[in-house]
């Protein structure tokens, strides 16, 4: 089966515990590991899944943004230990407040990358099938995220606090 060549040589480098984030030095190290892992992911998409380089790049970019902007530096979590709720927090709140013009086209592309990346991670044995199912469910919740963007733009007065509380970043 072709799955054997996915990460074969670099298994030690990409052990789950290597992605734990405890301090700034860990964050820098994990950021570098994420970049390396994303290159393997990209190659997998092109070589094994026969996706075009452009499509593979778009998917890898989405996963990259989610992990290296949100999970590692903001949440300080291991990319393999996230709950599906982290995807919801990212898409329903973090992306919206951190983007100049949040929009569904961009968010959909990012979430497609997140889903494809975590499917790859499940094939590598880094996450469980149940964890993948939850992540996929959150990645597919596009109508809800579109409503969140619309409601964000409609906020008046101190309405932000109620909007943020619905999918808070405080936890």
Image (cartoon, rainbow, N blue to C red):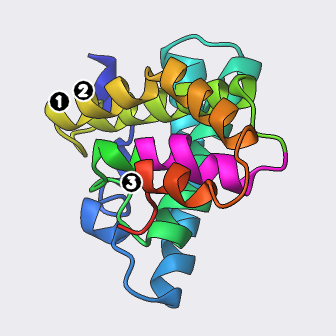
Task: Identify the residue at image location x=51%, y=36%.
Answer: 41
Depth check: 23 or 145 in front?
A: 145
Task: Identify the residue at image location x=21%, y=38%.
Answer: 131
* Residue 26 drawn at (x, y percent): 45, 82
| Front position among marks 2 and 3 | 2
Residue 103 within the magenta-colored segment of the rendering: no
Q: Give the residue at the far right of this rendering.
A: 100
Q: Do tag 2 and tag 1 residues touch (Cβ < 8 Å)?
A: yes
The secondary element bearing badge 3 is classed as: helix
- Which residue is the site of mark 1? 129
Label 2 crowding class (10 Å Cα cut-off): few <14, some 14-19, many 20+? some
Instruction: Name the quadrant containing residue 91.
Output: top right
State whether residue 12 appears in this view: yes
- Residue 10, which numbered label? 3
Q: CA distance from mark 3 to mark 1?
A: 22 Å
Above or below residue 55? Residue 21 is below
* Residue 40 drawn at (x, y percent): 52, 41
Bounds of the magenta segment: 88-100
Instruction: Name the quadrant containing residue 149.
Output: top right
Depth check: 169 or 37 in front?
A: 169
Depth check: 96 or 5 in front?
A: 96
State whether residue 57 appears in this view: no
| Front position among marks 2 and 1 | 2
* Residue 156 drawn at (x, y percent): 73, 49
The secondary element bearing badge 1 is classed as: helix
- Which residue is the site of mark 2? 133
Depth check: 30 or 76 in front?
A: 76
Q: Do tag 3 and tag 1 residues touch (Cβ < 8 Å)?
A: no
The secondary element bearing badge 2 is classed as: helix
Above or below residue 33? Residue 66 is above
Residue 136 relative to residue 63: left or right: left
| Front position among marks 3 and 1 | 1
């Amino acid at each position: 089966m072709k799955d054997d060549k996915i990460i074969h040589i670099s298994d030690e480098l990409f052990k789950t515990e290597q992605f734990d984030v405890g301090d700034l030095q860990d964050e820098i190290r994990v950021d570098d590991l994420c970049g390396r892992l994303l290159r393997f992911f990209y190659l997998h998409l092109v070589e094994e899944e026969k996706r075009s380089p452009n499509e593979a790049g778009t998917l890898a970019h989405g996963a990259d943004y989610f992990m290296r902007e949100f999970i590692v530096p903001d949440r300080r979590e291991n990319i393999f230990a996230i709950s599906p709720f982290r995807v919801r927090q990212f898409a329903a709140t973090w992306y919206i407040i951190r983007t100049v013009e949040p929009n569904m086209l961009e968010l959909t592309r990012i979430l497609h990358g997140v889903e494809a990346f975590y499917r790859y991670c499940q094939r590598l044995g880094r996450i469980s099938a149940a964890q993948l199912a939850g992540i996929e469910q959150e990645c597919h919740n596009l109508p809800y995220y579109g409503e969140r963007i619309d409601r964000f733009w409609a906020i008046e007065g101190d309405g932000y606090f109620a909007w943020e509380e619905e999918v808070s970043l405080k936890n």
